[in-house]
């Protein structure tokens, strides 16, 4: 009987750790060391025994061992996990701190790893609450901080569940396309979105214009800052680690060919690697229409800003039972325009998993204005012109790699090319 009770407690702890692994843990932004090859999933794995609770989700590697993806938590200690477990698990199922720590050390320490302070971005909210708890003296004060952190972690977990569910639905639809060859739901994951979000074309003409009515709505989703590392980040980080250990790469096309040679597509997926020599200048194309909306992008200084944008036609609003009067118009010169069912309306939520929108619908682009966007006016973006000092640094690097003992003549030509264009 004591053995059965002990097993029950172990399973209760495992259930909590499975939840952390599935909904909270991040992939590592920089692998500790590169593998021989990478799967398209790009996971960093830990070996587990065939009796581990995650065995059914793992990859068999032989010898009674399985490989399961590692997940990383914010810097902290096991005690902080136990404090969170006490708040998350019903009172009748709680275990002692010693049982919790023993199970973590025995079965989860290599799978759920606390990041070091210098590894990746730390969530500012988690950091603040951690400091407040360390400074708290009274048990009541500590409980208040832990409850606030639980609310934050629950919100993060719900958002990550939305992200995982979106991946699964998009993949399922891709495997079962419509007769027209399109999937009902297409998801495009973009790495480095925190650097690129201010330059990304935002479906300015709306679903009716940009997508030519192929999609009813378009969404942009942002995971919460500090908890945003997902499968795509890990894949790119793994590729970057492999590139840093490559024997000799002297140009961007050689890098592309190298990536093709090391990344192995899994689960019937296809790998596409392409060198983009130019991009369209969407910003200049849309500048005359002054499409500027503030306060809807999460940043370091504004983590509470909207994390989900949904672009819908006005007809969507009407089907939801709202009248045109419910749509906010931020531009005075648009107030006299006749409402059109294909007008682009933006809906926003503070967090991805929220059930309610956090503000009233806003008119983003009227059809009358969008119709003035002429595709023939969209031009290729001009190459960035660097200052003279930067060009000199490129020249010095080109001379260095082309001289003995390196003799990387293709690499020298690769660096000289932009310098000649900037001169």
Image (spheres, rainbow, N blue to C red):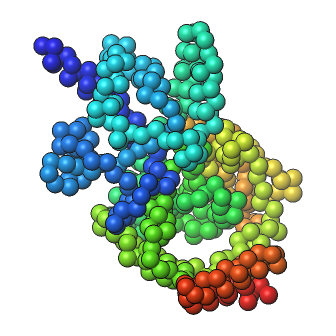
Coordinates of residue 374 in the picture (x, y in percent): 72, 77
Residue at the spot 55% in from the left edge and 37% down from the top edge: 354
Q: Is residue 371 visible?
A: no
> Seen in the image, is 169 located left or right of residue 217?
left
Residue at the spot 54% in from the left edge and 61% down from the top edge: 190
Quadrant showing the N terminus: top left
Outermost residue, left side:
1
Residue at the spot 81% in from the left edge and 62% down from the top edge: 290
Residue at the spot 55% in from the left edge and 80% down from the top edge: 252
> Seen in the image, is 264 located left or right of residue 26?
left
> Height in image: 223 above or below 101?
below
Coordinates of residue 213 in the picture (x, y in percent): 55, 66
> Height in image: 261 above or below 314?
below
> Seen in the image, is 125 located left or right of residue 238?
right
> Height in image: 355 above or below 146?
below
Outermost residue, front side:
405
Q: Quadrant of residue 247?
A: bottom left
């Amino acid at each position: 009987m004591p053995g059965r009770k002990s097993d029950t407690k172990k399973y209760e702890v495992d259930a909590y750790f499975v939840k952390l692994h599935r909904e909270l843990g991040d992939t590592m932004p920089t692998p500790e060391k590169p593998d021989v090859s990478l799967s398209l999933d790009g996971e960093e794995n830990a070996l587990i025994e065939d009796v581990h609770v995650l065995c059914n989700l793992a990859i068999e590697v032989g010898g009674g061992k399985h490989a399961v993806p590692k997940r990383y938590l914010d810097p902290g200690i096991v005690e902080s996990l136990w404090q969170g477990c006490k708040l998350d698990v019903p009172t009748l199922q709680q275990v002692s701190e010693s049982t919790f720590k023993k199970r973590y050390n025995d079965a989860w320490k290599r799978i759920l790893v606390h990041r070091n302070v210098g590894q990746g971005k730390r969530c500012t909210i988690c950091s603040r609450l951690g400091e407040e708890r360390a400074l708290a003296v009274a048990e009541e004060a500590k409980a208040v901080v832990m409850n606030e952190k639980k609310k934050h972690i629950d919100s993060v977990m719900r958002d990550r569940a939305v992200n995982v569910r979106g991946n699964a639905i998009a993949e399922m639809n891709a495997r079962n396309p419509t007769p027209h060859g399109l999937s009902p739901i297409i998801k495009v994951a973009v790495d480095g979105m925190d650097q690129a979000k201010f330059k990304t074309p935002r479906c300015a003409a709306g679903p009716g214009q940009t997508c030519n009515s192929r999609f009813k709505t378009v969404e942009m989703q942002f995971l919460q800052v500090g908890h945003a590392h997902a499968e795509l980040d890990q894949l790119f980080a793994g590729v970057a680690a492999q590139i840093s250990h490559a024997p000799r790469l002297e140009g961007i096309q050689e890098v592309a060919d190298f990536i093709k040679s090391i990344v192995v597509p899994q689960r019937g997926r296809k790998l596409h690697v392409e060198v983009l020599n130019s991009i369209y200048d969407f910003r200049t194309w849309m500048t005359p229409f002054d499409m500027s909306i503030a306060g809807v992008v999460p940043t370091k200084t504004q983590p509470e800003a909207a994390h989900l944008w949904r672009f819908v036609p006005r007809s969507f609003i009407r089907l939801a039972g709202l009248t045109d009067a419910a749509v906010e118009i931020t531009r005075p010169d648009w107030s006299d325009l006749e409402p059109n069912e294909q007008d682009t309306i933006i809906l926003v939520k503070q967090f991805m998993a929220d059930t309610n929108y956090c503000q009233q619908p806003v008119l983003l682009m009227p059809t009358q204005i969008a119709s003035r966007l002429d595709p023939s006016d969209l031009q290729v973006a001009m190459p960035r012109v660097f200052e003279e000092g930067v060009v000199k640094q490129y020249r010095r690097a080109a001379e260095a790699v082309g001289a003995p003992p390196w003799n990387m003549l293709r690499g020298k030509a690769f660096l000289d090319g932009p310098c000649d264009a900037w001169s």
